[in-house]
Image (spheres, rainbow, N blue to C red):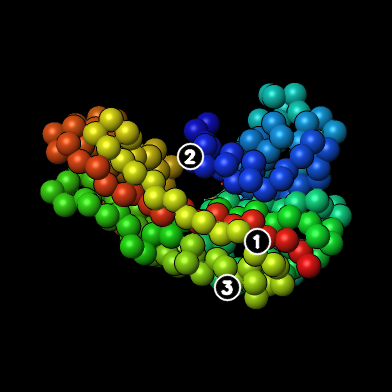
Amino acid sequence: MANIGEDTTRKLIESGEIKPGMKILDLGCGAGNVSFLLSDYIGADGIIVGIDSNEKAIERAKERSKELGLSNLYFCVGDITQDFKMEHSNFDAIIVRRVLMYLPNPQNTIAAAIKYLKPNGIFLAQENNISQTPIGLESMPQHKRINDLIRETLEKENVNFNMGIELNTILTNSGLKVEKLWAEAIVSTPNQHTNWAFLAQNMKERMLSHNVINDVSELELETLDARLTKERMENKRTFITDLVFYAIARKA
Ligand SMILES: C[S@@+](CC[C@H](N)C(=O)[O-])C[C@H]1O[C@@H](n2cnc3c(N)ncnc32)[C@H](O)[C@@H]1O
């Protein structure tokens, strides 16, 4: 399974002093992409607990840990919008990637989550800010069309397009001390792919359910990546697809 943004998440993990033997909570873990990255850093003596409301994603995460022979990763189904309860506690660190932007009240979620974090524990966040991107997409109709469909779907899901910009305030108001916050522009060039064909493939059911498309065939998924590549090559364009914000915070 593709792990979009693996390199950037590794930078966050490495800057965030994640060490062997740590016990880490992966909030909104999905199919476990962040947990599996983290497992390289915490070793066999560490523990990762992932929680997500999507039952299918949790099943997939469990299957993947079995396939990889990892017995120190635990995945559970749970809704983190509420004042959620966990069996595990005393975490050394919590990580959240591309989840806060989907939550109606991320501040409440973080305040509830950090009850399970040790004093002085680490909180790592990676969230996209999509209100000002893409930048430089003029004369790229294929790219524009697919990006519009993705954004329309996210809009219908009430995703916060400004989550990156708001991250510092949200973490601080949740009771964390933000030690470092930075952002990175994700750039596409003729040779450097966007992940939009992959995203369209992954989001097709959501696009259908929100009536953003009437039929999956409209996406022409079999040829989408090739068409996008051709358009980038022909236009010889560099453009910014995304802004990604990272934060390293600590529990007081
Ligand atoms: C874009 S995915 C990111 C998954 C994972 N963090 C990663 O980076 O690969 C967003 C995840 O947030 C989860 N999520 C959204 N709202 C949630 C909620 N209220 N409780 C638990 N998980 C939630 C979704 O099920 C989904 O798996």
Q: Position of residue 31 (x, y in %)?
A: 61, 41
Categorize mark 3 by other alpha carbons within 10 Å: few (<14), some (14-19), many (20+).
few
Circle 2/circle 1 CB separation < 8 Å: no
Query: In the image, what residue occupies the spot 63% across and 46% down?
Result: 15
Q: Amino acid at mark 2?
A: Ile
Categorize mark 2 by other alpha carbons within 10 Å: few (<14), some (14-19), many (20+).
few
Determine which residue is flagged by label 3.
Answer: 169
Quarter of the image containing the C terminus?
A: bottom right
Q: Amino acid at mark 1?
A: Glu
Q: CA distance from mark 3 to mark 2?
A: 26 Å
Q: Nearer the viewer, mark 1 or mark 3?
A: 1
Earlier-in-chain disc, 3 versus 2: 2
Determine which residue is flagged by label 2.
Answer: 4
Residue 199 is left or right of residue 234, and the answer is right
Q: Position of residue 65 (x, y in %)?
A: 71, 31
Q: Amino acid at mark 3?
A: Thr
Name the element at disc 2.
loop
Determine which residue is flagged by label 1.
Answer: 179
Residue 86 is left or right of residue 151, and the answer is right
Relative to 160, does residue 89 appear above or below in the rendering?
above
The quarter holding residue 246 reads: bottom right
Q: Position of residue 226 (x, y in %)?
A: 25, 30
